[in-house]
């Protein structure tokens, strides 16, 4: 088999698989007597990456936690997003704060999350995180009651285009982004709010994981077109 043939097979396999493929998975495409080594596979992947980087292509070869996949380049999202009429899922700040705490502080219990946030974590939030397969129970704390310990999954890393947890932005960078978002939310509130005589007495309550279309003060996680396969909207999406 020529190197060109092997590259064509690997390229086509990653393209049509519908999910990320590992080096071992790619090796298993070939018979035992003609199976390329892991180094051979990685060399071909390197060539493919360079090819798609230099060509004027809308695709790129990306390594995520579960393996390698082809995906649309992020800069094409404004056009590709028109392929899907459904609205992006909208999540409350409480939902995202819980996800961030699990991602950065794992392994962590629900009680520890509540202690940090200072409020009770909604059961709906924990259920939604597990239904999306972003979070899973990884054990139980050896204390009275044996509370569940939570951690993130490979699906979480794949969704956010990460190879490992070390690829997440540092907490300093995250705080800077959070501060910028907070300033933007305040500015939008000042521009769009028309105070009434009773507004100053309103007390905000804990939001549920899902918000309606008309609710403000939310953060949207946009379904980007760079995923290799379409993800169905789950019940936590608003609208």
Image (cartoon, rainbow, N blue to C red):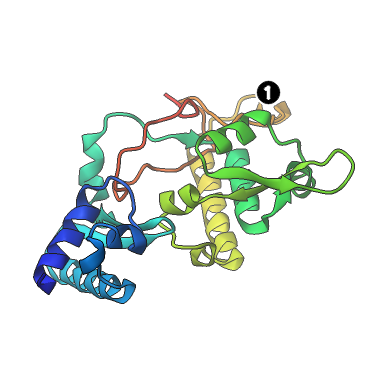
Q: Which residue is mark 1?
A: 198
Could you say which quadrant of the image residue 119 lies in? top right
Image coordinates for residue 161, horizontal then vertical, percent: 40, 56
Image vertical order of residue 195 relative to residue 33, above or below:
above
Image coordinates for residue 139, horizontal then vertical, percent: 71, 47
Classify 10 Å Cα crowding around label 1: few (below 14), some (14-19), many (20 and above). few
Q: Quadrant of the N terminus?
A: bottom left
Could you say which quadrant of the image residue 7 lies in? bottom left
Q: Could you say which is closer to the camera, residue 117 or residue 12?
A: 12
Relative to 145, 43 lies left or right: left
Q: How many marks?
A: 1
> Furthest residue to the right?
144
Image coordinates for residue 236, horizontal then vertical, percent: 50, 28
Q: Residue at x 22, y 60 (%)?
A: 30
Q: Could you say which is closer to the camera, residue 90 or residue 113?
A: 113
Image vertical order of residue 131 relative to residue 183, above or below:
above
Image coordinates for residue 147, horizontal then vertical, percent: 79, 41
Image vertical order of residue 231 relative to residue 57, above or below:
above
Could you say which quadrant of the image residue 103 lies in? bottom right
Q: Residue at x 25, y 46 (%)?
A: 78
Q: Residue at x 36, y 37 (%)?
A: 231
Q: Residue at x 26, y 41 (%)?
A: 81
Secondary-structure class at tag 1 = loop
Relative to 14, 208 lies left or right: right
Image vertical order of residue 176 relative to residue 98, above or below:
below
């Amino acid at each position: 088999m020529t190197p060109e043939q092997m590259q064509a097979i690997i390229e086509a396999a990653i393209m049509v698989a519908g999910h990320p493929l590992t080096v071992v998975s790619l090796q298993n495409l070939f018979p035992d007597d003609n199976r390329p080594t892991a180094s051979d596979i990685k060399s071909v992947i390197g060539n493919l990456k360079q090819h798609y980087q230099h060509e004027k292509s809308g695709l790129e070869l990306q390594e995520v936690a579960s393996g390698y996949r082809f995906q649309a380049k992020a800069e094409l999202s404004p056009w590709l997003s028109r392929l899907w009429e459904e609205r992006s899922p909208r999540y409350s700040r409480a939902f995202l704060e819980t996800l961030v705490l699990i991602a950065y502080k794992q392994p962590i219990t629900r009680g520890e999350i509540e202690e940090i946030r200072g409020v009770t974590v909604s059961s709906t939030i924990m259920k939604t995180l597990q239904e999306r397969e972003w979070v899973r129970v990884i054990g139980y704390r050896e204390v009275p009651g044996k509370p569940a310990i939570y951690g993130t999954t490979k699906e979480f890393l794949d969704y956010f285009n990460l190879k490992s947890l070390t690829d997440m932005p540092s907490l300093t960078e995250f705080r800077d982004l959070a501060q910028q978002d907070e300033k933007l939310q305040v500015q939008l509130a000042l521009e769009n709010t028309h105070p009434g005589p009773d507004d100053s007495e309103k007390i905000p309550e804990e939001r549920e994981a899902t918000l309606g279309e008309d609710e403000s003060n939310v953060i949207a996680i946009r379904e980007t077109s760079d995923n290799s396969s379409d993800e169905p909207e789950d019940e936590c999406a608003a609208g």
